[in-house]
Amino acid sequence: MAKPSESITLYGDKAELFRDIKEEMADRKGFEPGNSEAVAELMADWHQENRR
């Protein structure tokens, strides 16, 4: 059975914000994360914040 997937496209301010976040992640990690890795980290952070 195929695993589910989701695709998104960001425009304007949201795309710019995502690029800024990825740049900060790259500075912290020492390498530029791919889009999937960046989104996974953002989701993990959100999940941690909202489990309280």
Image (tube, helix red, strand yellow):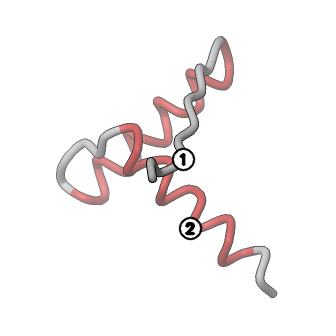
Crowding near pointer 1: few (<14 within 10 Å), some, many (20+)? few
Residue at point 48% right, 60% down? 41
Looking at the image, which residue is at 49% across and 42% down? 21
* Residue at the image point whose x is 46% and y is 30% from the top: 19
Task: Find the residue positioned furthest to the bottom.
Answer: 52
Q: Residues within 10 Å of mark 2 (few under 14, many from 20)?
A: few
Reading the image, the residue beneath label 2 is: 44
> Residue 20: which disc?
none
x and y, in percent, of residue 24 in the image: 40, 46
Q: Given the image, on which type of amino acid does mark 2 rest?
A: Ala
- Across and down, in percent, residue 8 comes to 59, 27
Local SS, label 2: helix
- The reply to whether dot 1 and dot 2 touch (C-beta < 8 Å) is no
Secondary-structure class at tag 1: loop
The location of residue 45, given as percent across then percent down, is: 59, 67
Q: Quadrant of residue 18?
A: top right
Q: Nearer the viewer, mark 1 or mark 2?
A: 1
> Residue drawn at (48%, 56%), measured in percent from left and top?
40
**Amino acid type assigned to the residue bearing label 1 in the image:** Pro
Instruction: Kindly give the residue lying farthest to the top in the view shown.
Output: 12
Q: Which one is earlier in the sequence, the residue at label 1 or at label 2? A: 1
On screen, residue 10 above or below 47: above
Instruction: Choose top left, top right, bottom left or bottom right for residue 51.
Output: bottom right
The C terminus: image quadrant: bottom right
**Number of marks drawn:** 2
* Residue occupying the far left of the picture: 30
Please state if 14 lies on the left or on the right of 18 as rendered: right
Measured in 3D between alpha carbons, the distance from the residue under mark 1 to the one under mark 2, in whole angstroms, is 18 Å
Is 24 placed above or below 18 here? below
Relative height, residue 10 to residue 25 (above, below): above
Q: Nearer the viewer, residue 34 or 19?
A: 34
Residue labelled with disc 1: 4
